[in-house]
Amino acid sequence: MTELEKVLRDDPRLPKLFDDPPDEVMRFILDYGIFGMIGGKGSAKRFRGIIDGHHGSGEGYRRHNGDPGILVHFSANVHPMALIEPPALIGPNCEVRAFSVIRGGTWLVEDCVVGSFCEIKNTLMLQGARASHLNYVGDSILGAGVNLGAGMKLSNFRHDGGLISVRAQLDTDDPIETGLTKFGAILGDGVKVGCNSSLAPGTIIGANALVYEATHLPSGVYEGDRVYYYHRDLTAHDR
């Protein structure tokens, strides 16, 4: 278990993230840690176990284009022009629109939306999470009801290729060492991020926070039930 996994389970400094994840999600996190799917060595192999479990359970899933590593619920709507790579699990009532790309290690739990020209990779999207317009989401967890505005990006990789650390509190320099080179963000239930905003690798935002449009958040832990934005002065002049 990495230091970050321990903190996410036990450290009271972290904000509330998820209220009531599905039992199957909780079992996976308890077995493998919060990053058992989205990061670390062997993550794809462990996630493959989820795919195999659903395939053998007879819970209303079908193989997508005959691929046993891609399961899509019969109630989900996957556009024929969407690209899905294994392993992937598309749950009930999810919508995957035309020209979207879902890369391996992605789990859309229920009622999720992946819009046109979006790319999702190694990501868990809980109930009702939406990445609807021109979004990139890599190595991340989106809580229930999360909404990403158009053009919003979740960065998941440092330019120098180094390990990603997270500041445990915004007013300290005490980093949490993740041991990962790929880690985007963990957004708690109900987080809303405005259009054309960006989150640096290693960002954790508590439930029901609001990030304004065109805002960049550096790596760190952000409390829930708050509004985050960069102050801008707009001055009008005569023509």
Image (spheres, rainbow, N blue to C red):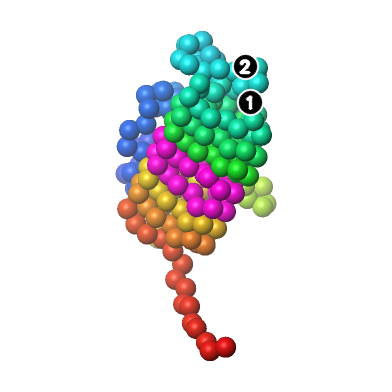
Question: CB under 8 Å between callouts 1 and 2?
Answer: yes
In the rendered view, tell whether residue 170 sits above or below residue 114. Answer: below
Tell me if 196 is positioned left or right of 187 in this view.
Answer: right
Chief SS of the magenta region:
loop
Q: Which residues are magenta?
A: 126-154
Report if residue 227 lies within the magenta region. Answer: no
**Residue plotted at (54% across, 23% down):** 72
Q: Is residue 40 visible?
A: no
Report if residue 149 lies within the magenta region. Answer: yes
The quarter holding residue 26 reads top left
Point out the tag, 1 or 2, that comes first from the N-terminus. Answer: 2
Nearest the viewer among 189 and 170 is 189
**Residue plotted at (47% across, 11% down):** 57
Q: Secondary structure at mark 1?
A: loop
Query: Residue 30 location, x and y as percent?
Result: 41, 26
Query: Residue 83 location, x and y as percent?
Result: 66, 33
The residue indicated by pointer 2 is 68
Residue 33, numbered label = none
Nearest the viewer among 32 and 134 is 134
In the rendered view, tell whether residue 201 sits above or below residue 102. Answer: below
**Residue plotted at (32% across, 37% down):** 19
Q: Which amino acid, by three-letter code, is at mark 2?
A: Pro
User: Considering the image in quadrants, where does the C terminus appear?
Assistant: bottom right
**Residue plotted at (47% across, 73% down):** 232
Nearest the viewer among 197 and 186 is 197
The mark total stands at 2
The residue indicated by pointer 1 is 86
Q: Which amino acid, by three-letter code, is at mark 1?
A: Pro
